[in-house]
């Protein structure tokens, strides 16, 4: 087996490995789904279908790759006599080389090549060259379209020593207008199919081409057809390999971005793979763990359970909950799901261990129990009143705040885990400022936060004032964050919109699962104001500004307020009166 075949075999095996890994992930996600369903939760929508589609795409890609490889091997054997033409597999290089050889072999002044588009079946201009090996544009090269079409349709070559006096073409305008003399045109044939046309001419010399040149060019054209097909197949093969690489990168990204830790072992119970979440949860490094026995990497794991799963291959995953000490983290609570890792034939090749860190969850559960003991009666009444609204609501005046914490196009290119960490850091600044002023976070929308003031849960008379205070706290928090992260002076990513008006607040959803939210034109208007804000700007409606400023004895330090202006926003005919606010970024 030569090195090329070795590479192709390795690439095939790599794709097969990716398919096996995806099948393993499908099994793990099904087990996760079952676990989550028992807890009344579910996987993110589309998780399993996305993996199944990924596996199906890889299988199609593998079949196409194998078929392309077989065809490429066969064609290479057929073209050993055309070493000069086949010195490259770049299609453009092959086409240029073909035309230079055509001109050299036939003594033509220029040459022109058309190829049939495999998708449309139409013949398309690909390259034209002259005797000086200069590439010509399509408009520079005037040819007899009649001759080209005739050869493309019939597959019969054409040679004429003096086109102007040839009875077959004497009425053709292009031949008469441009004084074309010697013309030679042959089909590119591959397996009995016309794949293209080679046209060569000399507008100055008569009698340049004869049967000898025709036979020579036809033989060369047949060899060239194979070389061109080789180059096309190589381009397809390279595209397939690029697709495999992209799919591999996607799979790695999916594996890296799974929130649960994932560890896989082989039949000798040695670690074969760990994702970033597992390394983070267990405070381990993948490079130091891969290839090592799992019992040495993580001694607390029940070795007998791992061995039993590897040997018995149960259908159901084994679940283990434990508390342990991890260096640098202290005591942690973990949930482990251990299941057999199978190959395509169903044989167990190792064990997959899914690790969920329950430390924060249990800490919050403990805090929640304490909160339930110490909640004020008023807060309990507010929560109960919201629940009693059923699937309806009530209209009340609220102040709505929308905060765009940072545009996605401003984030540096990082891996998914680091991106989410950075985004959450920005969201946290705004969320803490909102809750500090007793605002209610209605929802997170990617890089945006929607907050409400004066709902049934947080009734307040000074809601516009509190909303503006939380916005100013948010801005100050971002300025501090910019300094911490080394952003350039004057950096401003945030955009904010505020409006006060009547909205309907209540529960939407179903009897089994509902969500408290706010609906109405005033909510939409607050978001329109956000959309009209520039980076580092707070756009506040006149209604909110007047209500908030009634509580300020003097304007806050560092706050710049632009004159009142009217703007037109989407889906509203009447202009809106707004102020634009900016805080100094010291």
Image (cartoon, rainbow, N blue to C red):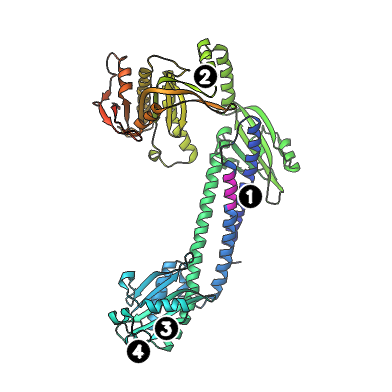
Instruction: Identify the mark at residue 91; answer none if there is no mark.
Output: none
Neighbours of disc 1 within 10 Å: few (<14), some (14-19), many (20+): some
| Distance (Cα) linking label 4 and label 2 | 97 Å
Sequence order check, earlier mark of 4 and 3: 3
Q: Which residues are magenta?
A: 49-56
Residue found farthest to the top: 377
Instruction: Identify the mark at residue 158; answer none if there is no mark.
Output: 3
Which tag is nearer the camera, tag 4 or tag 1? Answer: 4
Viewer-side residue, 485 vs 572: 572
Which tag is nearer the camera, tag 2 or tag 3? Answer: 2
Neighbours of disc 4 within 10 Å: few (<14), some (14-19), many (20+): some
| Distance (Cα) linking label 2 and label 1 | 49 Å
Give the quadrant of residue 504: top left
Q: Mark 2 sits on what residue?
A: 386
Sequence order check, earlier mark of 4 and 2: 4
Q: Could you tell whether 44 is left or right of 207 in the image?
A: right
Residue 98 is at least partly visible in this image: yes
Instruction: Identify the mark at residue 207; answer none if there is no mark.
Output: 4
Neighbours of disc 3 within 10 Å: few (<14), some (14-19), many (20+): some
The N terminus lies in quadrant: bottom right
Sequence order check, earlier mark of 1 and 3: 1
Residue 3 is at least partly visible in this image: no
């Amino acid at each position: 087996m030569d090195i090329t075949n070795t590479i192709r075999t390795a690439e095939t095996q790599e794709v097969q490995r990716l398919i096996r890994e995806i099948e393993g992930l499908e099994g793990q996600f099904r087990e996760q789904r079952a676990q989550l369903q028992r807890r009344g939760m579910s996987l993110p929508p589309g998780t399993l279908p996305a993996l199944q589609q990924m596996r199906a795409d890889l299988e199609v890609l593998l079949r196409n790759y194998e078929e392309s490889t077989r065809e490429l091997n066969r064609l290479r054997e057929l073209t050993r006599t055309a070493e000069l033409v086949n010195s490259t597999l770049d299609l453009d290089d092959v086409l240029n080389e073909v035309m230079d050889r055509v001109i050299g072999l036939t003594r033509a002044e220029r040459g022109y090549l058309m190829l049939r588009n495999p998708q449309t079946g139409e013949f398309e201009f690909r390259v034209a060259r002259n005797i000086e090996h200069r590439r010509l544009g399509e408009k520079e090269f005037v040819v007899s379209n009649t001759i080209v079409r005739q050869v493309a349709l019939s597959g019969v070559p054409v040679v004429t020593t003096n086109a102007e006096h040839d009875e077959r073409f004497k009425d053709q305008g292009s031949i008469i207008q441009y004084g074309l003399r010697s013309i030679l045109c042959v089909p590119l044939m591959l397996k009995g199919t016309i794949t293209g046309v080679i046209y060569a001419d000399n507008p100055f010399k008569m009698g340049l081409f004869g049967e000898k040149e025709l036979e020579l060019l036809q033989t060369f054209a047949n060899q060239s057809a194979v070389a061109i097909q080789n180059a096309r197949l190589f381009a397809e093969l390279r595209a397939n390999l690029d697709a495999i690489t992209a799919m591999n990168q996607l799979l790695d990204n999916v594996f890296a971005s799974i929130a649960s830790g994932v560890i896989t072992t082989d039949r000798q119970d040695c670690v074969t793979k760990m994702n970033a979440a597992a390394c983070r949860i267990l405070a381990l490094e993948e490079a130091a763990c891969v290839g090592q026995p799992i019992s040495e990497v993580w001694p607390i794991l029940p070795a007998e359970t791992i061995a039993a799963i590897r040997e018995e291959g149960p259908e159901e995953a084994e679940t283990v909950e434990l508390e342990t000490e991890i260096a640098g983290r202290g005591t942690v609570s973990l949930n482990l799901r251990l299941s057999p890792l199978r190959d395509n034939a169903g044989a167990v090749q190792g064990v997959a261990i899914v690790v969920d860190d329950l430390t924060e969850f249990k800490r919050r559960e403990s805090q929640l129990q304490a909160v339930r003991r110490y909640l004020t009666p008023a807060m309990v009444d507010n929560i109960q009143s919201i629940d009693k609204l059923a699937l309806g609501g009530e209209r009340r005046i609220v102040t709505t705040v929308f905060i765009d914490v940072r545009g996605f196009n401003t984030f540096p290119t990082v891996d998914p885990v680091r991106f989410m960490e950075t985004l959450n850091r920005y969201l946290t600044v705004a969320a803490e400022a909102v809750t500090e002023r007793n605002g209610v976070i209605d929802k997170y929308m990617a890089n945006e936060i929607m907050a409400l003031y004066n709902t049934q849960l947080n009734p307040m008379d000074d809601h516009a004032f509190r909303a503006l205070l939380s916005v100013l706290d948010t801005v100050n928090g971002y300025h501090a964050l910019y300094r911490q992260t080394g952003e350039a002076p004057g950096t401003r990513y945030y955009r904010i919109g505020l409006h006060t008006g009547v909205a309907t607040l209540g529960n939407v959803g179903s009897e089994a699962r509902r969500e408290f939210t706010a609906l109405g034109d005033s909510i939409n208007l607050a978001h329109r104001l956000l959309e009209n804000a520039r980076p580092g700007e707070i756009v506040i409606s006149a209604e909110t500004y007047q209500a908030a400023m009634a509580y300020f004895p003097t304007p806050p330090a560092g706050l710049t307020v632009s004159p009142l202006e009217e703007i037109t926003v989407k889906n509203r005919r009447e202009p809106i009166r707004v102020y634009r606010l900016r805080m100094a970024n010291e």
